Image: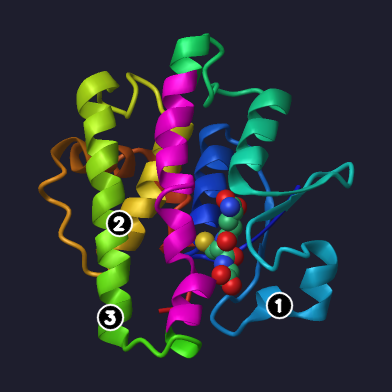
Amino acid sequence: MRLYGFFNSSTSYRVRIALALKNIGFEHHGINLRSGEQSSTDYLALNPAASVPLLIDSDGTTLSQSLAIIQYLDDTRDGPRLIPVDPLARARVMEASLAISCDIHPINNLRVLGYLKRELGVTDEQKNTWYKHWVEVGLAAFEQLLQRYGHGPFCFGESPTLADCCLVPQVANALRMGCDLERFERVMLTYRHCLAQEPFQRAAPDRQPDYIV
Ligand SMILES: N[C@@H](CCC(=O)N[C@@H](CS)C(=O)NCC(=O)O)C(=O)O
């Protein structure tokens, strides 16, 4: 199994966490988003969406979209289930996961921030204001989901789910961008609990072969 990703891409990080939690070995193939490698002819032939992650399974199955990849791994591999089978538990996990993957990540993606700068001429400061605004709006909503329906130490109980796979990279990304998230109490408690677990540590950006400072 091969994973095309980038060390600090949050969507690649989601999949790496899922692979680590299920203890699935994989070959890491770095796609350098800083140099624009996602738009190279070779990579576009694999993934016309010009984004990471991309998973190629040992039978040649090719899949993009981090949530689809994690669902596929959950359905085809052993190890702890990350998406519960019970309908309501499953819906809660999806509700939280989509709050990050649909409501926060896409409007702060590299190509969106690049468009704001290049095409609309916003300054770095304005771009960072945009980033922080949407992260804070999104995580405020996520905090409410955890306050109402979550029960620790992970987002939804004693074992990690897809929601934790989405939360950790989003928080890591926001902290890297200088956001102050301490007022999101449950978010930060959950984040810190996850980071103390070995599989989450194995998936961290600075543990990846393509890590650059
Ligand atoms: N919805 C996709 C998003 C994939 C995505 O856009 N990934 C980012 C990295 S986190 C990317 O490759 N960005 C490249 C760009 O914006 O040019 C997923 O969940 O996999």
Q: Which residues are magenta?
A: 91-116
Q: Nearer the viewer, residue 114 or 183?
A: 114
* Among the 4 quarters of the image, the one containing residue 140: top left
- The residue that mark 2 highlights is 135
Mark closer to the observer (3, 1): 3
Which quadrant of the frame does ligand 1 lie within? Answer: bottom right
* Among the 4 quarters of the image, the one containing residue 122: bottom left
Q: Main secondary structure of the magenta part?
A: helix
- The residue that mark 1 highlights is 39
Q: Nearer the viewer, residue 158 or 35?
A: 35
* Quadrant showing the C terminus: bottom left
Residue lying farthest to the front in this orientation: 120
Q: Position of residue 24 (x, y in %)?
A: 64, 38
| Earlier sequence position, callout 3 versus callout 1 | 1
- The residue that mark 3 highlights is 126
| Earlier sequence position, callout 1 versus callout 2 | 1
